[in-house]
Amino acid sequence: MKSYPSAWLQGVSLGETIACELRLQIINGTFKPGEVISENRVAADFGTSRSPVREALKTLSNEGLIRLERMGAIVIGLSLQDVEELYDVRYLIESFAQQRLAAGSHSSLINNLKQNIDKMELSVKHNDIVEFSYLDFCFHEAIIVEAKHARILHLWKSIRHIVLTVMLITTEEVFSEGEHKLITVIDKHRVIVEALESKDVTVIQRVVREYFADSNKTLHSSLP
């Protein structure tokens, strides 16, 4: 996986752009736990001053991916247990959000989700891993935003950068398994939409539980 989706980086600071690239390299194992990330080296690689690099490293430190010391930034990384716990938090957030949507009318969201699925199918035809993973991410984020719960949204925003990075990596593994696997992934998203349309809390609970149980299996086969 070479980079983040261009749409994700639009309008963000240089520091956040650097954070995104370093985050990806840490989580995909390019940077190993215990390695030192040099401010000067990163600044040279990105052709910038050390100021945005410091901004990036502070962000990654807050996410728990590195530890800032005098000698430089020490890579902590993201263990499989870390990722599993991250997905536990995702499950709690999305389960709550989807059940909350059982009440009220959300036709605009449903239409948006269906269009998103159509675009995912198109990205499969174009063999576009980055676009597919970004659309997958946007699908789930749209549901969380629609729930209109300030504290849940705040919690989601605290993990969304790492979530997207993990999705970029796991999507690469899914693409390597061929079109049949990708169709299965897309169908799982259709089932989520159907559950939301049913407005049946019991159905929604079952679907979101099954979705994350399957996603957990993909995690174990995808991460270094």
Image (tube, rainbow, N blue to C red):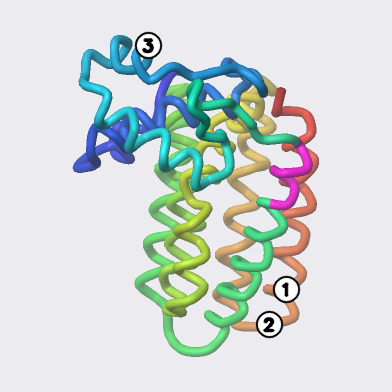
Residue 201's label in the rendered image is 2
Percent position (x, y) of residue 86?
66, 51
C-alpha separation, residue under disc 1 versus residue under disc 2: 6 Å
Q: Nearer the viewer, mark 2 or mark 3?
A: 3
Query: Which residue matches tag 3?
Result: 41
- Position of 104 relative to 164 (above/below): below
Indicate whether residue 83 is drawn in magenta. Answer: yes
Give the side of residue 173 with respect to residue 167, left or right.
Answer: right
Element under disc 3: helix
C-alpha separation, residue under disc 2 versus residue under disc 3: 52 Å
Query: Which range is magenta?
Result: 80-85
Tell me which numbered mark, 1 or 3, is placed earlier along the sequence: 3
Percent position (x, y) of residue 205?
73, 73
Give the side of residue 128 with respect to residue 108, left or right.
Answer: right
Percent position (x, y) of residue 142?
43, 62
- Position of 76 relative to 152 (above/below): above
C-alpha separation, residue under disc 1 versus residue under disc 3: 48 Å
Question: Can residue 144 be spotted in the picture?
Answer: yes
The residue under label 3 is which amino acid type?
Arg
Indicate whether residue 12 is drawn in magenta. Answer: no
* Residue at image coords 71%, 44%: 82
Query: Which residue matches tag 1?
Result: 205
Element under disc 2: helix
Q: Quadrant of residue 176?
A: top right
Q: Nearer the viewer, mark 1 or mark 3?
A: 3
Tell me which numbered mark, 2 or 3, is placed earlier along the sequence: 3
* Residue at image coords 65%, 52%: 188
Question: Can residue 125 be spotted in the picture?
Answer: no
Q: Quadrant of residue 203?
A: bottom right
Are the residues at dot 1 and dot 2 in contact (C-beta closer than 8 Å)? yes
* Residue at image coords 52%, 53%: 159
